Image (cartoon, rainbow, N blue to C red):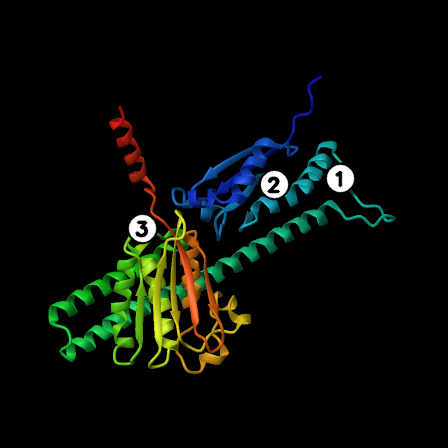
Amino acid sequence: MDPTPRQQLNLLLVASRHHLSSGDLRSLIQFLEKEDCGFDVTLQVADPLQQPELLELHRLVVTPALVKLQPVPKQVFAGSSIFQQLRGWLPRWQQDEVVSGLGLSLKPTELDGSRTQRELQLEDQLLVLRQENETLIDRLQSQERLLRMVAHELRTPLTAATLALQSQQRGQIDLNRFRDVLKRRLEEIALLSKDLLEVGSTRWEALFNPQRLDLASVAAEAILELEKLWFGRDVTIHTDIPADLPLAYADQRRMRQVLLNLLENALKYTQDGGTIAVSMLHRTNQWIQVSVSDSGPGIPEQEQQRIFLDRVRLPQTSGGTSGFGVGLSVCRRIVEVHGGRIWVISEPGKGACFTFTVPVWQGQGQEKMSTALTEGQSAP
């Protein structure tokens, strides 16, 4: 006699290549492929960039997302713990399958006080609605953070263009130099506007273009761009960048933003006659370490982690400086997307030293494959 056929569990994973590299989704896929979940599991994987209609069809407000298509009712799991959410729900689905297979109605008796099947279904639907509400709130918060960050980044090219205009009016730079600066700043604003338009279909972190990058040149450009903020203030800027510093693997525009933010903060909090230092070290074959230090008022130890959160400004300095407290948050997000980390070492009254790491260029991508192929063809 044939065994009773098992119920189908049809799942749809809406995730880009970037998402699929995460440990949570890798564990999810391996679990569904190797473990017996009590169902005949079918898993489909779709890229939201190639099939954007799925976002509207399943009302997905954030990706990655896992959609349970069958058995009904449909459920959506999203966020950074999809695998954990799935494992939490599997026992309930298995219980529903057994009850359905036996043809039981689960009608309650007056003595045990158990719930009706309708109540169980309403409870499931309520949990799904709560989850969708939490996902929507996370999405809105993410969009709000993005808007603040793009607004903050727009301030840099606008400030540079304003300073260039002032310099040209005072005769400090000629008209050709002014036009060149203005052209580059307008191009940056156009790129930031493109980021803002694209974020509706992808994550902010995906808008990066890492490539071979000379960090020393990027640092020199950032220092010159902020010249008006330190020129005439008797502020000394030291640089310590070794000649044999390897190329980095990073997005040029984003790395420039990190250095501009850190240098602008250092200039903001350093008094006239103070000192700012920019140094770079190549400690390992994988990472370059970049530091920006100042002789400002310093940061209390209890605040040194909190300052990298969104919209955090220190009460002891917020009264005398401008800004919305998102600059260091921008730096943290950019550095972390590159795989690095950022931290600060400081003592009150002794200045602060902000340090971040960025990966070394090691022939990533197609160039690395091309080099290997060329070496293979030239080998005897």
The residue carrying mark 1 is: 105
Q: Is residue 112 visible?
A: yes
Mark 2: which secondary structure?
loop
Tell me residue 32's x, y (percent).
58, 35
The residue carrying mark 2 is: 72
Q: Is residue 20 above or below residue 207?
A: above
Tell me the quarter of the picture where residue 230 sits. bottom left
For label 2, count other residues whose C-alpha is less than 10 Å away and answer few (under 14), some (14-19) or many (20+): few
Is residue 97 rendered to the left or right of residue 59?
right
For label 3, count other residues whose C-alpha is less than 10 Å away and answer few (under 14), some (14-19) or many (20+): many
Of tags 1 and 3, the one toward the viewer is 3
Residue 327 marker: none
At x 21% / y 63%, what residue is drawn? 184
Of tags 1 and 2, the one toward the viewer is 2
Asked whether the beta carbons under mark 3 and mark 2 sit within 8 Å of each other, the answer is no
Nearer to the camera, 81 or 156: 156
User: Of marks 1 and 2, which one's residue comes earlier in the chain?
Assistant: 2
Tell me residue 380's x, y (percent).
26, 23
At x 68% / y 47%, what residue is drawn? 121
At x 59% / y 36%, what residue is drawn? 31
Residue 246 marker: 3
Q: Is residue 290 above or below residue 211?
A: below
**Given the current orientation, which residue lies at the most extreme right position?**
111
Tell me the quarter of the picture where residue 28 sits. top right
> Mark 1 to mark 2: distance in Å?
17 Å
Q: Amino acid at mark 2?
A: Val
